[in-house]
Image: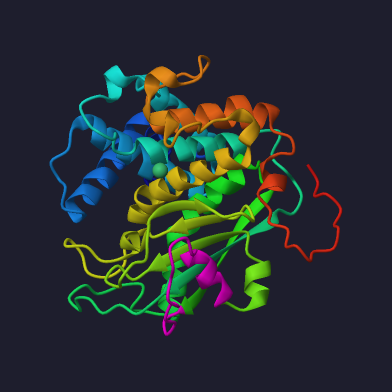
Amino acid sequence: MNKFRLHLGWMVAAALWSALATGARGADAPPSEAVFARQANRLARDYFAKTGKADRTPLEVEALGTFFAAKEIYDAGRFAECRDRLDAFWKRRPMGKVEIWTNVDWPTGYVPLQMLTECVHARTSKDWFQGKPEPWRMTAVLIGKTVGSKEVTGDLLELGDSKIAEQEVQRATAFFGEYLKAITKGRLQLEVRVVSLNNWSPPQFKEGDSFVSAVEKALPPEIRRTTDCWWMMLSTTNPIIGFWGGTLVEDDGRQHFLGGSEWVQSNQFRKGPPSDQEYQTGVSNWFHHEFYHYLFHAFPEFNLEPVEHAWWYRDKWPADFVGYYETDYFLEGLHKRIHAKGDPPIHVRLKYKPPDAPAAPQPAR
Ligand SMILES: [Zn+2]
């Protein structure tokens, strides 16, 4: 009898403990806001300590931590829970309200939070495409030999066409790829391949010659005709011909991301390639910015970049655009123009059609 009572006692204690641990809402309920906030705080502080920028404001810790913690939930496929966390965050810290996000040139965590919010709202939308997405093929080209300091390890260009370069390019583009899929409601899937032109020497250039055209011509025709967008990375220590860095849209309508290899290299705080978190907060911002130059260019009817970086001139924004930062402008352009009125839509407009392509049926909208 005593033995039985003891056993029962343990069962009661175990049930009580379980109820307390799950906030008495059952084992499947998400952790409480306080548990989430603790996890967010821990992730942000670890990140700042590792990247050598420990002295951060509470808002920066909260914003970046919320991104990291929400991204973990997103990666686990718990989209509704992730959406609720982000919506709660934006309620506390409204998007585009400069009096909240002020005192920093560029609010830490702001852009990745906006990107993830877009992703999770698309993933939980009834408009999410249930069919197989079409590939959007990015060819990452590593150009030239690095002759610079050997103290910088993990230099992508030194790695040439090795498996590590391939792996780093895949990791660097992963979050941007998810974002691209989200803004096409699941219809375009980024596919990345890496080609190396490590032993290529550029021809002599005259004024007006296109360096990227010369790069393209040096690549096999099959690669050229199956590329929807280019990411061209040049050794930063090589002589550079003309403008380099940012976005270029050539006559055939394809995007070139130029430069950006600095995001995939070592820095003074760590040796070797960046962590996934650094890729999500660093190079993804860069892709995002460059991509919007291109996206707005692909929808000329909306005139969203009438002068270069039109979004930097707040008093000249379209009257119906709200917000303050450039990425607020991007979101407004995406939602109020491109999603609302763009025809054909993004996934049709961004696909490259080589001149010799047979007339194909229009992809599903
Ligand atoms: Zn720009």
Quadrant in which residue 360 is drawn? bottom right
The image shows residue 273, relative to residue 90, as above or below, that is below
The image shows residue 236, relative to residue 83, as above or below, that is below
Q: Residue at point 37% right, 33% down?
A: 20
Residue 107 at what x, y percent from top left? 29, 34
Q: Can residue 77 be seen in this view?
A: no
Image check: 326 left or right of 219? Answer: left
The span shown in magenta is: 197-218
Q: Can residue 254 be seen in this view?
A: yes
Secondary structure predominantly adopted by residues drawn in magenta: loop
Q: Foreground residue, 267 or 68?
A: 267
Residue 142 at what x, y percent from top left? 43, 73
> Residue at the left extreme?
55
Ligand 1 quadrant in view: top left
Q: Quadrant of the C terminus?
A: top right
> Residue at the top extreme?
319
> Residue at the front extreme?
207
Image check: 97 left or right of 203? Answer: left
Q: Residue at point 46% right, 65% down?
A: 232
Q: Foreground residue, 285 or 116?
A: 285
Q: Residue at point 46% right, 33% down?
A: 307
- Total number of numbered labels? 0
Let me know if residue 217 is in the magenta part: yes
Q: In which quarter of the image is the N terminus?
A: top left
